[in-house]
Image (cartoon, grey):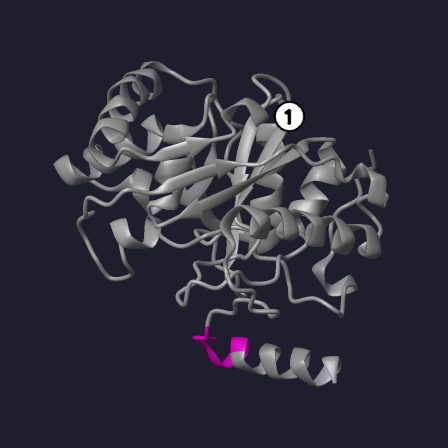
């Protein structure tokens, strides 16, 4: 597999990749987190306690767990409906799954900070700090660190949560990650998680959800990571598999967060003009 860096700017037919919601998809810069550590006592204690409780309280319908390889490099590519998704996937998967989270979840002070730190550590989150580098590529590099040690990494190809329930077009970062590391991709379909924790809510509600793990996808048939066409075709295959699991209405567009700064608005305007 090639180790070429993914350059979003080289793909005028797609928006810049923002693979996970927790990393700001903007002109903000972040610092690559430290290499993933082996799971410690907090992880096993948290998982051992929370997973059975979650299954008892929320009674999720889980199908396809046998599709997740018990060892080796695997990417869990999921649709994204709620903040709770990043908790549901690690607690329902049959192996340790890691994902990215804001560094502020790990750096708080006092009792509240300690609780947040222990909780996100227990579910396998990796903190990403602001510093230097492009946010989207840093997110991919952090995922690569997990996969390079034969880990499992969860990613949302849509980039951010779907507020209207539709399935948006996938960004090609997920394909770059799979083609660069040789990881297989297991599509994940989450149904009903937005009912547990709707946008703006602070406490979860008890609702039954469905978690579907699809058959593994070998995206290497499309080419190498340095090919924009290969990344696009691989990503479309992954999104089609997710759609097959969820049955969501297709949006046929990217799920864009509204620009919050003048620089972001100018970049967005230039990008759209280039597409015409």
Give left or right: position of 103 versus 117: right
Magenta stretch: give its range: 258-264
Q: Residue at x 73, y 80 (%)?
A: 275
Relative to 28, is 1 on the left or the right?
Answer: right
In the displayed structure image, the side of residue 191 where residue 133 appears, left or right = right
Q: Can residue 134 be seen?
A: no
**Is residue 273 highlighted in magenta?**
no
The residue pinned by badge 1 equals 73
Q: Position of residue 207 (x, y in %)?
A: 24, 45
Give coordinates of residue 212: x percent, y percent. Answer: 48, 38
Nearer the observer, 153 or 245: 245
Mark 1 residue element? loop
Front-lying residue, 132 or 139 = 139
Residue 91 screen position, x and y as percent: 36, 29
Please state, as top left, top right, bottom left or bottom right, where the N terminus lies in the image: top right
Q: Visible in this render: residue 78?
A: yes
Residue 172 location, quadrant: bottom right
The residue depicted at 33 percent of the width and 43 percent of the height is: 209
């Amino acid at each position: 597999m090639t180790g070429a860096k993914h350059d979003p700017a080289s793909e005028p037919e797609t928006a810049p990749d923002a693979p996970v919601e927790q990393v700001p998809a903007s002109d903000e810069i972040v610092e690559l987190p430290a290499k993933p550590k082996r799971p410690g006592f907090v992880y096993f204690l948290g998982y051992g306690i929370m997973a059975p409780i979650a299954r008892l309280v929320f009674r999720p319908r889980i199908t396809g767990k046998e599709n997740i390889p018990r060892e080796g490099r695997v990417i869990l590519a999921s649709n994204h409906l709620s903040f709770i998704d990043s908790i549901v996937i690690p607690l329902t998967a049959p192996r340790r799954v890691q994902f990215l989270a804001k560094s502020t979840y790990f750096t708080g002070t006092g009792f509240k900070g300690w609780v947040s730190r222990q909780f996100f550590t227990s579910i396998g989150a990796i903190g990403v700090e602001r510093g230097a580098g492009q946010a989207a590529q840093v997110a991919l590099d952090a995922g690569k660190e997990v996969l390079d040690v034969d880990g499992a990494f969860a990613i949302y190809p849509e980039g951010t949560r779907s507020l209207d329930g539709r399935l948006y077009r996938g960004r090609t970062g997920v394909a770059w990650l799979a083609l660069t590391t040789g990881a297989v991709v297991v599509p994940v379909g989450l149904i009903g998680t937005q009912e547990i924790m709707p946008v703006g809510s602070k406490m979860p509600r008890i609702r039954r959800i469905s978690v579907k793990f699809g058959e593994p996808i070998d995206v290497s048939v499309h080419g190498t990571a340095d090919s924009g066409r290969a990344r696009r075709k691989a990503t479309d295959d992954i999104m089609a598999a997710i759609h097959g699991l969820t049955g969501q209405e297709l949006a046929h567009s990217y799920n864009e967060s509204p620009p919050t700064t003048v620089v972001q608005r100018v970049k967005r305007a230039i990008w759209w003009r280039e597409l015409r």
